[in-house]
Image (tube, grey):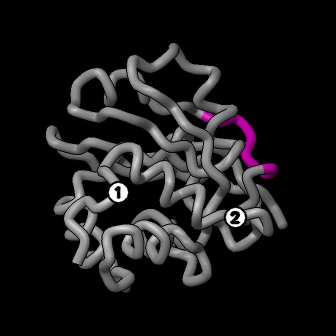
Amino acid sequence: MNAVHAEGFAPYAFADSRLLVLGSFPSVKSRAQGFYYGHPQNRFWKTVCGFFGEETAKDVPARRDFLRRRHIALWDVVLSCEIAGSSDAAIAGEVLADVPALVAGSGIEAVFCNGKTAYSLLGRLPPLAVPVLCLPSTSPANPRFSEEAWHTALSGVFGERYDRI
């Protein structure tokens, strides 16, 4: 597979966002869909919606609505790169996002890196003024995914019983 130049997404964030979930770079499926975590086997939506006791948001408008209501921002550390397929290992010539500026200009209280690549890339930027946690990637390619780790981390930001149904 040949590498192509690809552009990521703008941050999906609001002034009242409390949590930033930071991925590495959108997958081929996400880029085709035009929004974060678009691969049907990615566990992000099931995990985060489940934490709040909600049905998994199935389409982009429902996902946007969920994030807005729950004060969750999404972005990727890589703005653009050369990439073949969707593997983080295939990212080359990356341009990194200004994550510190986004965090500084918001109400974000914590950053969760969705996997080790996002965490490693974030480490190349100036330190953030909020806690940063590296969580197991929700990618279907990660056999060591832990929903419990995500729920524990989410509890640290939103509380054990935050607005559950």
The three-letter amino acid code for the residue at tag 1 is Glu
Looking at the picture, does residue 95 appear above or below residue 162?
Answer: above
Disc sitting over residue 145 in the figure: 2
- Which image quadrant: the N terminus? bottom right
User: What residue is drawn where x is 15% and y is 42%?
Assistant: 16
The three-letter amino acid code for the residue at tag 2 is Phe
Looking at the picture, does residue 58 appear above or below residue 146?
Answer: below
User: What residue is drawn where x is 44% and y is 48%?
Assistant: 21
**Residue 45 appears at what percent x and percent y?**
44, 72
Task: Quickly name the residue at label 1.
Answer: 160
Q: Depth-wise, is mark 1 or mark 2 nearer the camera?
A: 1
**Residue 134 appears at what percent x and percent y?**
61, 41
Crowdedness near tag 1: few (<14), some (14–19) or many (≥20) residues, C-alpha within 10 Å: some
Look at the image and say whether residue 56 sits in the magenta stretch. Answer: no
**Residue 64 appears at what percent x and percent y?**
26, 67
**Residue 113 appears at what percent x and percent y?**
55, 43
In the shown orientation, is residue 85 left or right of residue 57? right
In the shown orientation, is residue 20 left or right of residue 121? left
User: What residue is drawn where x is 22% and y is 78%?
Assistant: 165
Q: Residue furthest front?
A: 160
In the shown orientation, is residue 52 left or right of residue 45? left
Looking at the picture, does residue 63 appear above or below residue 131?
Answer: below
Residue placed most toward the observer, 48 or 28: 48
Give the magenta part as a residue range: 89-94
